Amino acid sequence: MKPTIYDVAKEAGVSIATVSKVLNNTGRISEKTRKKVLEIINRMDYHPSGVAAALTGKKTFTIGVLVPDIANTFFAEVARALENKAREMGYAIILCATDYKSEREREYLDLLLKKQVDGVIMATEPNDLEPFRKLSERQVPLLLFSVDQLSVASNVVTTDNVRGGYIAGQYLVKKGHRRLGMIVERKRQSGRARLSGFQQALAEEGIDLEERFIIDTRSTITEARQAAQHLLSLDEKPTAVFTANDLIAVILINEARKAGLRIPEDLSVIGFDNTIHAEIVDPGLTTIAQPIEELASYAFHQLLQSIERSTMAGHRIMLSPELIERASVLDLSNTK
Amino acid sequence: MKPTIYDVAKEAGVSIATVSKVLNNTGRISEKTRKKVLEIINRMDYHPSGVAAALTGKKTFTIGVLVPDIANTFFAEVARALENKAREMGYAIILCATDYKSEREREYLDLLLKKQVDGVIMATEPNDLEPFRKLSERQVPLLLFSVDQLSVASNVVTTDNVRGGYIAGQYLVKKGHRRLGMIVERKRQSGRARLSGFQQALAEEGIDLEERFIIDTRSTITEARQAAQHLLSLDEKPTAVFTANDLIAVILINEARKAGLRIPEDLSVIGFDNTIHAEIVDPGLTTIAQPIEELASYAFHQLLQSIERSTMAGHRIMLSPELIERASVLDLSNTK
DNA sequence: AGTAGTTAGTTAAGCGCTTAATCTTAAAAA
DNA sequence: TTTTTAAGATTAAGCGCTTAACTAACTACT
């Protein structure tokens, strides 16, 4: 049978309180007894029960992470970064994939409530606000990661999508492009923000983003392919296209190549996210990188603060994305 | 404050035992009291504490999943399938990414021990066997997923890699290819198995896989690129190449195209895993699909059995992979 | 020597549940 | 009517820890 704190205490000839204290470095214990207890713990290979500790200590050192889909490269990387940060801080992560279904969201939130997680990080746009109300009623700190929804009272850590779009726009303009297009996920808040930043950058240079060059899509392979084909079928194509994310960019590149276009000579493409797709596609995809590691760091920090103070500050932290230059955008500026 | 079972009991005018019973559908309770209790639970929005239940009930309904890297598409899909299955069965998953480091493996296993998970699924080849000994000492059921290591006593659920290689070989031969190559991860057991199956299929047709066409690599972008370049630099190239996984296949396709080769006309490629890379690359990658969903199902089933019976059967289940035909392999058979 | 302060450790009360043992009542059997 | 039996509910112990309150033994100081 697994040894308990009683076994250790008996073996060491001290009370369980003493053992507990050396375990947690609380209270005062002489170097001598500490040594002895530690040695016995080691010898018995005793591992304190996190469950029991949670029941008394009121903290489970576990946080719930909700993502829409782990198989999506971007969220996989988010999960990885968060998981990494969590481990560093001594927390474990319960991973929940909502599959974009609010029913799952609800299910999972209930599960997390039951498991008594210390906090929740949501990397998915909430459909149904009701479950979140419960969270806040229960004082479970919530942090929105990479999504921004003001209606849910919580801390927010996200990429500055407007800025991301702006950077992309500015870059393309600097490279001499004047006839621009965008494939965008208008359904998502982040998509609209990217579009708006993009337009803003163009507007500053007096360039108009024509409505017919703004193609709305969703982030599935088939829909993206359709969107790409649609864009390529226009008789007067843009010279450069900004896409909602890397996946779409890669699909656009493939479709363009099939249509006989060379990248970037005949069509420049710039993506978003800097996922592995950007790295392996040929030519390498110039893209806007979300600072995932940093986002994860801030997210954790904010969440832990909320947990400790048991109050949600309601801060919103927006980190700036960064341009990663590869080879998918042609420089027209000297040709001009 | 969060309501406890006491609050519910008091409100309903019954004992906490009664509440516990309606919660768990154990013992006998009259329809009337059940109704009443349920109604109160609902009204108070009471959620039983999983922590307390775990302390008494001896089960946490949580299992640990170790993967080397979630950002790797294949493992992301594994994680997703497992997570999905877990949810269906009322379990939560603690996700652990070892990053291929045995130190992390150890760290996580300790964490999982402390968190008292009911079982562990490992989707990573263990380096250091010591931590696993601890698990089995502690009677924590372990299941190896998609890796096969006999030295660790546990159940195993994996893809039949030998068969996968065999299927790939058979297919290429059927398509008329005679000069074959393989880019393989020899360091990994699965890689060696795939190679051996591949060779077996060729041998049956009297075809020899030349040693110089067997390129050893590891699954990182740079190494894969080098391997691809190496293969392409051989003066007499194979007509078809089987790669250790889809990532490598995609990289090979890109490198080949850069070298002026058309796919599949000048070089046929067949991958392994059927990840998203296979789907989005152009031309679509013919590949060997691991039956991830099914693997996850079996894995869970086996693990739950072990948990219930608190004994590890030591079964090994090997599911056959399946060929997914896309467009990256040229049919030479009628040209011949 | 007497009192206060420190230090090291102990006692005991929970935390929120599950469950075996027990009790109560009313219906069925004798 | 008395005895069984079964159904429905309660009591209470205990899961493995944390922590506030307390005690005992020193040390330091007037």
Image (cartoon, coloured by chain):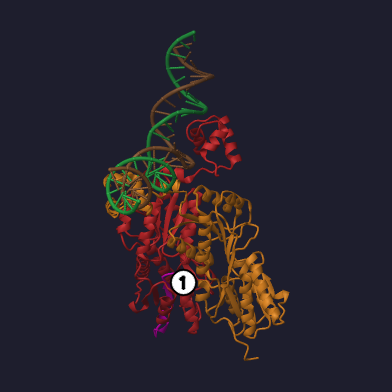
Chain colours: A orange, B red, C brown, D green
| Residue B258 among magenta residues | no
Of residues B276 and A144, the one nearer the viewer is A144
The quarter of the rendered structure image containing the N terminus of chain B is top right
Q: Chain of mark 1?
A: B
- Does residue D7 appear left or right of residue A211 in this picture? left
- Does residue A6 appear left or right of residue A174 in this picture? left
Of residues A291 and B73, the one nearer the viewer is A291
Relative height, residue B266 to residue A222 (above, below): below
Magenta stretch in the rendered image: B231-247
Q: Which residue is mark 1?
A: B247
Of residues B214 and B293, the one nearer the viewer is B293
Relative height, residue B272 to residue D5 (above, below): below
Name the residue at 72% across, 82% down. Answer: A206
Residue A2 visible here: no
Measuring from the top left, give residue B145's x and y in whole percent: 40, 58
Relative height, residue B283 to residue B138 (above, below): below
Answer few, some or many: residues within 10 Å of disc 1's Cα (few below 14, many 20 plus, some between 14 and 19): many
Residue A271 visible here: yes
Mark 1 belongs to which amino acid? Leu
The quadrant in which residue B38 appears is: top right
| Local SS, label 1 | helix
The quarter of the rendered structure image containing the C terminus of chain B is bottom left
Name the residue at 44% across, 61% down. Answer: A89
Measuring from the top left, give residue C7's x and y in whole percent: 33, 52
Name the residue at 47% across, 64% down. Answer: A80
Measuring from the top left, give residue B24's x and y in whole percent: 49, 38
